[in-house]
Image (cartoon, rainbow, N blue to C red):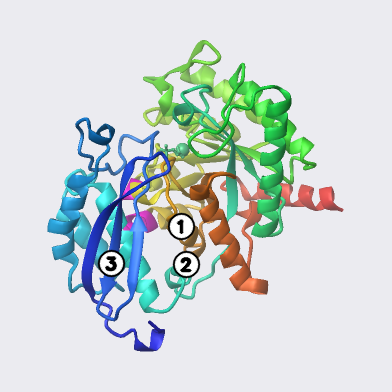
């Protein structure tokens, strides 16, 4: 369908089916067909280390498929969501999402299912873009400035994604010195490859965790950090070319102000835990730390951000759950300086966009993110570019549900040719003085 004939963008047909995700669990795929013949399709991702306040998936429970079945979510789509959206204009994303929110009527999409609403919302966006004859990112950008995002690439996977072999969930590489996404991918591939070689040399290569990062065989959380720093060095990069990011996902081992690190066999209060983390940021080239403390530990977030926020990006994931009001509150209290943004935490694209714009307005960093349960769906690559988020986190540099997203950004960058602007370290949420410092150090590394 060409753009010139795409006149009637009303939704004619919405259908939903069960497909499988990267953990082999069922998930929801939605197809939206418009009167003009354009079609959009999207699949809901699924998290494992979830925030308490995020949109919830509707799952069947019971024995079949481990309780992860999506029959109820499909039924909501067929009997409630489809009838409510038929005849509506797919170009009016905000209106469509408002209908979904009203139809659900709960705080957390518990009635219709966040898996149902996000798949429908994203499929509508894809159909609208197709009707306009545009790639989704360009449709979303609507003529505004876009940048190609700086990636966060997982090298070791831990926490809930690796049988809690280490407590910290993600040890990631950030190619802050790359000049383009294409170069960033080469740098991350080299770090991933060298990390694998180091693990093999140490006799610790055991396969990969849920997001494709190496399965962590370490004696302590800090040893994993040291190994990543060594892999970066071995790959030939200085700390201003490739830096380290952590997603601590501290809510998985912290509760009521107590942090129990299974691998380190230690229990710390919030102050002592934050102090330990601050120490890591001083000893290792860390530029970004996500969910340093549990989501109920706002005081800990503020303490950590006060201590390191000038030089380190502090990202709220479970702490913010892609919610605009929480983003604004965090900006006001100084709890963090960047927001992680996941479509299915919000449950509709419009709510996710509102959270992203709240972060932008507050001068915070914006990181569009995948979930640990993913599929071939590459919508987030388009959201990161189209909404000019500046950063993208999709897991490791292995397994096609991850590579599909990285590959999609490569294609977008190629399409833009000389017009492509890579966000680089300018996208970090830490103080602009620190960003300038990193950029200068990178230039002198090169020079
Ligand atoms: P999840 O983890 O998708 O398993 O919730 C991803 C993250 O914490 O960023
Ligand atoms: Zn996280």
Label ID, residue 441: none
Q: Residue at x 26, y 61 (%)?
A: 97
Q: Which mark is in front, 2 or 3?
A: 3
Determine crowd level at label 3: few under 14, some 14-19, many 20+ residues with C-alpha closer than 10 A.
many
Label ID, residue 32: 3
Label ID, residue 378: 1
Q: CA distance from mark 2 to mark 3?
A: 18 Å
Q: Earlier in the sequence, mark 1 or mark 3?
A: 3
Q: Residue at x 63, y 26 (%)?
A: 224
Q: Which residues are magenta?
A: 345-354
Q: Secondary structure at mark 3?
A: strand
Q: Quadrant of the N terminus?
A: bottom left
Q: Secondary structure at mark 1?
A: loop
Residue 32 horizontal/vertical position (percent): 28, 67
Q: Is residue 127 left or right of residue 157?
A: left
Label ID, residue 137: 2
């Amino acid at each position: 369908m060409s753009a010139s004939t795409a006149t009637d963008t009303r939704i004619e047909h919405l259908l939903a089916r069960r497909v499988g995700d990267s953990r082999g669990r069922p998930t929801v795929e939605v197809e939206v067909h418009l009167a003009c013949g354009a079609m959009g399709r999207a699949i809901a991702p699924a998290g494992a280390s979830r925030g308490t306040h995020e949109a919830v998936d509707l799952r069947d429970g019971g024995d079949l498929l481990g309780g992860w079945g999506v029959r109820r979510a499909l039924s909501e789509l067929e009997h409630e969501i489809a009838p409510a959206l038929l005849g509506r204009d797919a170009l009016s994303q905000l209106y469509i999402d408002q209908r979904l929110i009203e139809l659900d009527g709960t705080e957390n999409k518990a009635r219709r299912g966040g898996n149902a609403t996000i798949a429908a919302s994203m499929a509508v966006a894809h159909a609208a873009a197709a009707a306009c004859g545009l790639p989704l990112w360009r449709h979303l950008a609507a003529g505004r400035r876009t940048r190609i995002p700086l990636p966060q690439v997982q090298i070791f996977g831990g926490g809930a994604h690796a049988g809690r072999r280490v407590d910290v969930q993600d040890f990631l590489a950030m190619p802050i010195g790359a000049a383009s996404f294409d170069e960033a991918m080469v740098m991350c591939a080299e770090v991933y490859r060298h990390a694998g070689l180091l693990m093999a040399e140490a006799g610790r290569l055991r396969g990969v965790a849920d997001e494709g990062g190496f399965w962590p065989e370490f004696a302590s959380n800090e040893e994993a950090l040291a190994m990543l720093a060594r892999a970066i060095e071995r790959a030939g990069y200085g700390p201003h070319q490739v830096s380290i990011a952590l997603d601590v996902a501290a809510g998985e081992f912290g509760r009521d102000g107590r942090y129990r690190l299974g691998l380190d066999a230690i229990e710390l209060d919030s102050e002592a835990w934050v102090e330990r983390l601050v120490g890591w940021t001083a000893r290792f080239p860390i530029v970004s730390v996500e969910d340093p403390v549990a989501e109920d530990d706002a005081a800990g977030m503020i303490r950590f951000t006060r201590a390191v926020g000038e030089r380190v990006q502090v990202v709220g994931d479970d702490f913010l759950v892609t919610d605009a009001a929480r983003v604004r509150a965090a900006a006001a209290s100084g709890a963090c300086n960047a927001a992680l943004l996941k479509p299915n935490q919000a449950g509709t694209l419009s709510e996710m966009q509102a959270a992203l714009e709240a972060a932008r307005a507050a001068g915070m960093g914006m990181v569009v993110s995948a979930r640990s349960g993913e599929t071939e769906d590459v919508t987030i690559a388009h959201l990161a570019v189209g909404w000019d988020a500046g950063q993208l986190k999709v897991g490791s540099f292995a397994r096609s549900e991850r590579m599909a997203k990285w590959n999609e950004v490569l294609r977008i960058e190629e399409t833009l040719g000389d017009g492509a602007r890579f966000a680089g370290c300018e996208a970090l949420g830490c103080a602009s003085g620190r960003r300038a410092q990193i950029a200068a150090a990178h230039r002198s590394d090169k020079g």
